[in-house]
Image (cartoon, rainbow, N blue to C red):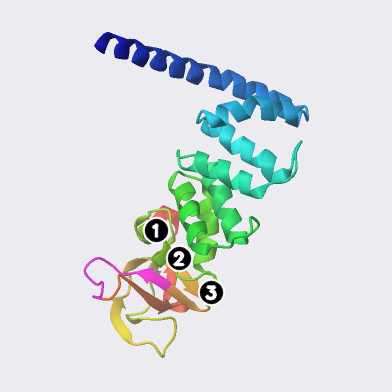
Amino acid sequence: MRSRLLVVALLLFLTSSWALAEAPAAFEEGMKALLKGNFAEAYCHWRPLAERGHAESQYHLGWLYANGNGMNVDVQQALRWWQAAAEQGHADAAFALGLDYMTGEGGERDMAKAAHWLYRAAAAGHADAREVLLRLAGDTATGDLLEMVPALAEAPWFGWLAEVRGDRVNVRAGPGKSHRIVGKLKRGQRVRVVGRRDNWLRIRLPAGQETAQSPFAWVYHSLLRPVSKEAV
């Protein structure tokens, strides 16, 4: 019995290894077909690979469905394959998912899901995803991006570094003078700006100055100035 199990395990290993070795070649054949406008042929190369878990094929298959290349447009199928690829760490697929949830083109506008997938893409180094997240952080219609994705607060690529311009600058619990003062900053202190509402900037408070309620606060925009990359 044990020897039979070993044989079965070996066969499964050899089969999966062969499939992985063949995947790049078959995927490239699909790309060649795509460049020639042979969408059906590209589909025939990519669909079996996608079903075996080849992330790049899953991502490209999603675009065939999204654009209706050689088939009817099917955004739900596009989302299905993009998510399969994104869950394997495919940054472009995560970005595509995030944009779709952000715009609602797939029928469901969900900013929490959009933020989640955009963050996954951005964390993997996707420059466009980082740019979109920064833009969303300053959009009042987005909601609280840092509540949706708390890990953003720790991401070194999110936001920008600023320096305090005034001698004693009040920081507030919300974006406006009607909100209570929760602390003060001194001239020359550096903070990371992680959002904007009109003329108010949301900052990550320096270490040791966080409040019990939140590590974030708000400062009027003219009281901070950007720190150039050369000065960091």
Callout 2–callout 3 Cβ contact below 8 Å: no
Ranked by sequence position, the earlier of labels 1 and 3 is 3
Could you tell me which secondary element the residue under label 1 belongs to?
helix
Residue 69 vs 156, above or below: the answer is above
Work out whether residue 180 or residue 7 is closer to the camera in this orientation and state it: 7
In this figure, which residue is indicated by the disc labeled 1?
152
Ranked by sequence position, the earlier of labels 2 and 1 is 2
Q: Residue at x 55, y 73 (%)?
A: 141
Callout 2–callout 1 Cβ contact below 8 Å: yes
Residue type, label 2: Leu
Question: Given the current orientation, which residue lies at the most extreme left position?
Answer: 208
Give how far across and how far down residue 114 sits, in percent: 52, 57
Residue type, label 3: Thr
Give how far across and how far down residue 47 sits, in percent: 62, 30
Give the spatial CA distance, label 2 vs label 1: 8 Å
Q: Is residue 128 visible?
A: no
In the image, is 16 to the left or to the right of 129? Answer: left
Could you tell me which secondary element the residue under label 2 belongs to?
helix
In this figure, which residue is indicated by the disc labeled 2?
145
Give how far across and how far down residue 122 sits, in percent: 47, 49
Majority SS type along the magenta span: loop
Residue 3 vs 57, above or below: the answer is above
In the image, is 35 to the left or to the right of 229? Answer: right
Marking on residue 140: 3
Q: Residue at x 30, y 76 (%)?
A: 185
Give how far across and how far down residue 2 sits, in percent: 25, 12
Give the residues in magenta. Answer: 202-212
Q: Residue at x 55, y 48 (%)?
A: 95
